[in-house]
Image (cartoon, grey):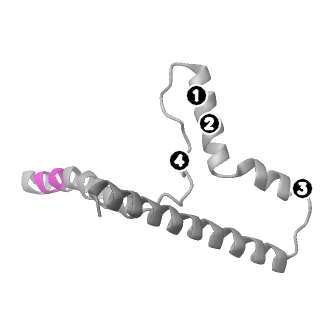
Amino acid sequence: MSSMKNSSDSLSQSLPRMLATKYQDSKELSTSLEPYSGRSIGNVSNVNAAYRRLNAILAQNNVRRELRANMYYEKPNVARRRKNIERNRKLFGAMVRKKVALIMQMKQRGM
């Protein structure tokens, strides 16, 4: 019985480590294009700092823009086209930023 308890204890101790490494790896693979997905802003003692952080998260996720856009009905085809345009614009901007960073890095190296 004690061996069964030891095996369950080791499993319960190794499970958080496995989950931590799984989620850590997924964060490394995630891009900066993804919006903030958490539900809390952390333990902040200053209310003003918490309010600024919340506003920054809402701005990053375009919550206010989506609320304004959902005031009126948008046809599915128009919504699909708009989302494709937004996605392509975001990817293009990311590619340009990456190229500019590469050029700046090459300049610093004297290439």
- Mark toward the start of the polypeptide (3 vs 4): 4
Q: Is residue 77 left or right of residue 109?
A: right
Q: Within the magenta stretch, is there residue 67?
A: no
Q: Earlier in the sequence, mark 2 or mark 4?
A: 4
Identify the residue at the far right of this view: 72
Q: Is residue 34 visible?
A: yes
The residue wearing badge 4 is 38
Instruction: Tell me how far mark 4 sits from mark 1, CA to CA.
Output: 14 Å
Q: Residue at label 2?
A: 54
In the displayed image of the protein, which residue is found farthest to the front?
110
Residue 9 inside the magenta-drawn segment: yes
Residue 88 lies, in percent from the top left, at 63, 73
Q: Residues within 10 Å of mark 1 (few under 14, many from 20)?
A: some
The range drawn in magenta is 6-10
In the image, residue 55 sits, relative to residue 49, either above or below, namely below
Q: Which residue is disc 1 drawn over?
A: 50
**Decide: marks 1, 3 in contact (CB < 8 A)?**
no
Whether residue 23 appears in this view of the structure is no
Q: Which residue is mark 3?
A: 71
* First along the sequence among labels 1 and 3: 1
The amino acid type, in three-letter code, at marker 4 is: Gly
Tell me the mark number nearer the camera, choosing from 2 and 4. 2
Q: Tell me whether circle 1 and circle 2 mark residues in contact (CB < 8 Å).
A: yes
Q: Neighbour class for label 4 at 10 Å: few (<14), some, many (≥20)?
A: few
Q: Position of residue 42 (x, y in %)?
A: 49, 33
